[in-house]
Image (spheres, helix red, strand yellow):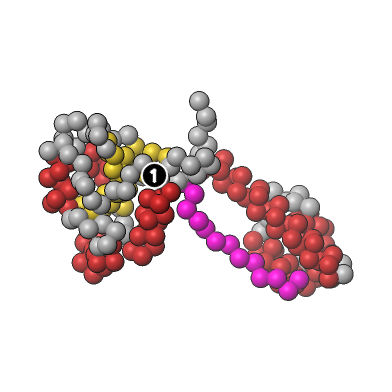
Amino acid sequence: MPVRLGPIDLGDADARRLISACGEELRQTRLALGLSQRSVAKAAGISPSKLGRIERCQVRDPSLVAVCRAARGLGLEASLRLFPAGSPVRDAPQLALEGRFERLLGPGLRMPREVVLPSPGDLRAWDGAVSSIEALVFMDAETRLGDMQALARRLEAKLRDDPRSTVVILVVARTAHNLRVLREHREVLRALLPLDGAAIARSLRAGRLPTASGIIVL
């Protein structure tokens, strides 16, 4: 059975990959420009030995400041972006929200949690997948709503990459903040998630899966 790596192992692997790629790019750029480690290190305000260790990936945890300074000394601008690559750590409010949703499920419905997308190497997962004998719908839970357009893009990408179903239920915690966001921005998600909570709850309690995607507040 394959071992599921946790955030520490995956984060360490990401760091090693980024450190290696960054060090090699600094070294190659410096050599291409014909600059010495001493001159670049002086411009960056670090020691030549430290720059050399960064280039050779011999610093386990190099300072982001030192890397960015060295990059600027070489006429480069460092950039770091974050991309969805798996399920976030679930805290108590998240687990409680998923539990409230699970209690809506009527006879014949079951919901395994953290269902990984089927593509090899894809670390993303749905928070749950509600299934009956005939069909399957996905569930994602949000304890605090933020950028609704970014949320829509994330759900669309997961639906696109998971052929098992075209229906997703977004479960939102009932907080003053979330209710305000939904009042102001519900229509941003209307095309993707047309159903509202009452229709979703009726279907689930009757042991039926919704035939369209939607949002339910619990």
Q: Secondary structure at mark 1?
A: loop
117 to 74, vertically: above or below: above
Percent of width and height locating residue 69: 70, 69
- Name which residue type carries label 1: Pro
Instruction: From the viewer's perspective, tell me whether residue 138 is left or right of residue 66.
Output: left
- Helix, strand or loop: magenta stretch: loop
**Residue under the point 83% across and 67% down:** 32
127 to 143, vertically: above or below: above
From the viewer's side, name the closer residue of 18 and 155. Answer: 155
Percent of width and height locating residue 207: 16, 36
Indicate the quadrant where residue 45 lies.
bottom right
Judge whether residue 177 can be spotted in this image: no
Q: Is residue 91 magenta?
A: no
Percent of width and height locating residue 82: 52, 58
Indicate the quadrant where residue 146 lies.
bottom left
Number of residues whose C-alpha sits closer than 10 Å to that of mark 1, classed few (under 14), some (14–19) or many (20 or more): few
Magenta segment boundaries in residue numbering: 74-90
**Residue under the point 18% across and 55% down:** 196
Percent of width and height locating residue 215: 23, 54
Counting labels gives 1
Judge whether residue 192 can be spotted in this image: yes
**Residue under the point 32% across and 34% down:** 112
**Residue under the point 26% across and 45% down:** 97
Instruction: From the viewer's perspective, tell me whether residue 181 is left or right of residue 11.
Output: left
Instruction: From the viewer's perspective, tell me whether residue 66 is left or right of residue 200.
Output: right
As drawn, which residue projects farthest toward the top? Answer: 1
Q: Is residue 77 magenta?
A: yes
Residue picked out by circle 1: 163
